[in-house]
Image: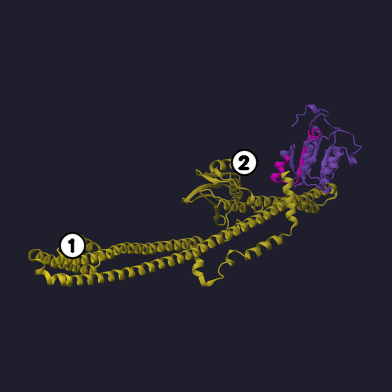
Chain colours: A purple, B yellow
Amino acid sequence: MNAAKPIVLAEDNPRDAELALAAMEEEHISDKVVLCHDGAEVLDYLYCRGQFKSRLKGNPAVIFLDLKMPKVNGLEVLRTIKADINLRPIPVVMLTSSREERDLAESYALGANAYVVKPVEFHKFLSAVKELGTFWGVINEPPPEGLRSAQPHS
Amino acid sequence: MACHLAMESATHQQSEPPTLVSGEVESRSDIGPDSTSSSNGRVSWFEKLTIEQRILAGFSLVFVGILVITAVSYHNTSIVLTNSRLDGRSHDLLQLLSTIDVAMNEAEDAHRRYLVTGETSYLESYKKVVQQKPTFATYLRELTRGSTEQEQRAGVLERMMEKQLNAESKAIDQFDRGGFRAVKKMAIEGAGRRELGAVHQLITDMDSDERQAMNRRMADSAEGTKNTIVLLGLGAFLQLVLLAWVYYLIRHDITERRRVAEELQRRGELLEAANKELEAFSYSVSHDLRAPLRHIDGYAALLRKTVEQSLSEKGARYLQTISDAAKQMGQLIDDLLVFSRMGRQEMLHTSVNLEQLINNILADLRLDLQGREISWTIAPLPEVKGDPAMLRQVFVNLLTNAIKFTGTRPKASIEIGVERPNSAEVVIFVRDNGVGFDMEYASKLFGVFQRLHRADEFEGTGIGLANVRRIVHRHGGRAWAEGAPDSGATFFIALPTRSHEP
């Protein structure tokens, strides 16, 4: 169990964020969620910069990443994460409206751990977010930190 | 990175006013290739010739010109050559005539001196001339051959020489027998004097005739040479003009072709830009249009949850309708995106085993078929050329349609068959005994979002057959349908047997 680790939700749309939080609330994991409103905030969080300067150190359990965000978009965030040897182990789930094949292909090519298309129907969206939150935030065992040498350098 | 770039360029395209692009295309098409011709009606027959024909005509004229010049020059030169050969002979003849003249004078002179003096050295001189005479005759005949008048004169001349020499020989004989006395008269007057005069006259005539002939020939040759030079000059000039014309034609053609190629490339770029714009548009539709729908459905659900206790039945129905409408629009957007993707996606051209394809589809549809009784008749299906994923989409649509519209039948029957009307195409049909349709509306079947049934009768967005037609068209084939209300429908697709490269 990784109850202590936060879940980062990168979502620029406040309504989507509210709906996602509503879903997490049903699973009682909403208090673990750190909401970032664009890609830059996600990177600030990960590198403990800006408003996250004084946060507790440590990587999140999972990052839910929207593709289309202002300032730094989801793919750019993903690229940065997977290029950083400290951040690379963090599971990244793309949570997006886009069904475009090239987005899918590019996300996986950059090393996304999962790709979930936000369903239009709320109950499907609800169950998707619940399952994701439960699986990645609770069930899944995140990688241990400080094992830099164990990571193959690619 | 590629995606990022593509998106950036896509948004850049979007920022341009789209009317500007299409307007530019319009104005450009006005100065198309047809505006350069047709300005000169005077040479309309020439305008009709293709550039290849014009160049061929130009080169043919040059070729004919060279042939004519060569022939005429050869003719003229050979005349000049003949004349110069004849001139050589004339010179010989003139020489011979003067030699004969001198010799005959000599003979007359020598025989008279002999008659008077009896000196044998004079007789020797005379005899020498007599000996030379046959040689003279031979040369004369030879050098006058071909010219009738001179030939006749030469004959007369020969006889006269003969006569003269005979008369003189006779006198010498008489002198030898009877001495000076016997030939006194002859020795003073000369035995062949009369003939010598005739010989001299003949030689003069022949000489003057031959000189005249020579002059004529010389004038003739000069004229021929002059003509040849003029012809060569004129011909060279004409050919230069012709070659310049052909050069102009080729040059013009190359410029024209280059212009057309540039124009084509420009239009290709415009088309590519428009395509990118469309892609950006559908990307944006895919992403941005779905979000509000999700919010409508989401907040309707949240609202329902919040007010669940106090919600009336009517209120619950309204909320349900809001959700349903949002879901339906989501489905429409998805279908439209698939349709748009079918139109612009790169196509593969491989062999597709239809038999295998249909079996896979039927296996995938197995879950949907639970609780249905359908008798399938599937003919052996051929291999066709095309894009496997797209063709799969075609048959998924046709088969799900057949399954859907036979839903009201207690016992449905669906047949998949093949027809080969000719060698150029293969026709595959899907026939069902479902609700069918009125042929009056057959043209509407394949339109986007066109439905022949009410939404509460059969579900669906009306995009399936539009996709079928689009895909079949991209394969170079045709799609059509036959049917009647309540007695089933048959959907046909004809695919070319040879791979269709767009």
Q: What type is the residue that disc 2 sits on? A: Asp
Image coords of residue B356 (percent x, y): 55, 40
Q: In the picture provided, is A104 more to the left or to the right than B131?
A: right
Q: Check disc 2: other Cα within 10 Å, few if <14, some if 14-19, many if 20+.
A: few
**Range of magenta residues:** A84-107
What is the chain identity of the residue bearing mark 1?
B
Image coords of residue B208 (percent x, y): 28, 71
Judging by the rendered image, the residue that carries numbered circle 2 is B364
Q: In the picture provided, is B13 more to the left or to the right than B382?
A: right
Q: In the picture provided, is B133 more to the left or to the right than A147?
A: left
Marker disc for residue B454: none
Q: Secondary structure at mark 1?
A: helix
Q: State yes or no: residue B66 in magenta.
A: no
Image coords of residue B393 (percent x, y): 61, 47
Residue B97 visible in the picture: yes
Q: Quadrant of the N terminus of chain B?
A: top right
Q: What type is the residue that disc 1 sits on? A: Tyr
What is the chain identity of the residue bearing mark 2?
B
Q: Residue at x 25, y 70 (%)?
A: B206
Quadrant in the rendering for residue B368:
top right
Quadrant in the rendering for residue B349:
top right
Judging by the rendered image, the residue that carries numbered circle 1 is B122
In the rendered image of this protein, does residue B178 appear above or below residue B279? below
Q: Residue at x 69, y 50 (%)?
A: B334
Q: Secondary structure at mark 2?
A: helix
Q: Of marks 2 and 1, which one's residue comes earlier in the chain?
A: 1
